[in-house]
Amino acid sequence: MALTAGQIAQGQLDAYNVQNLDRFCAYYADDVVIADYRGTENCQGLAALRDRYAKVFAEFPGNQVVLLGRIILGNTVIDHEEVRRAPDAVPFYVAAIYTIAGGKIARCEFVKA
């Protein structure tokens, strides 16, 4: 049985929070695009995604995301997230907009506050 869009978004978030790079990347399409909302594409392809998040996990071993809210509309998932780079760090907030295609995250755009 295929995963729902919400299960895909949750699975990658759970993998992110335990910094399991292989499991995290398994939720993304080979040609994934990571971008600023309606702006610059920061990362293209699974190899680039893997490299990017390997660096994030190495630089911020205490990094955690708390899901504050989620909207699911068809193949689009919008997560409101609180991000802390370390347990005592000042948080920052993002909206992550995931587009699901073929059972994987094909695109993710971030709105940062």
Image (cartoon, grey):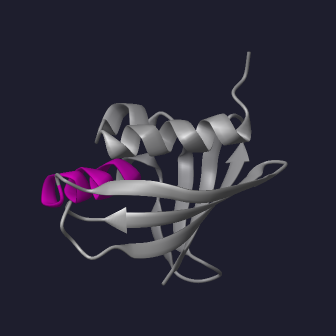
Q: Position of residue 105 (x, y in %)?
A: 61, 46
- Direction from residue 60 to residue 1 in the image, left or right: right
Q: Relative to 99, does residue 80 appear above or below in the rendering?
A: below
> In the image, which residues are magenta?
49-60
Magenta stretch: helix, strand or loop mostly: helix
Q: Quadrant of residue 37?
A: bottom right
| Residue at screen point 59% across, 83% down | 39
Q: Relative to 38, does residue 101 appear above or below in the rendering?
A: above
Q: Position of residue 36 (x, y in %)?
A: 53, 77
Residue lying at the far top of the rendered structure: 1
Q: Position of residue 103 (x, y in %)?
A: 68, 34
- Direction from residue 75 to residue 110 in the image, left or right: left
Residue lying at the far right of the rendered structure: 74
Q: Position of residue 83 (x, y in %)?
A: 37, 65
| Residue at screen point 44% across, 66% down | 82
| Residue at screen point 58% across, 61% down | 108
| Residue at screen point 37% across, 45% down | 16
Q: Quadrant of residue 107?
A: bottom right
Say if the magenta span includes residue 85.
no
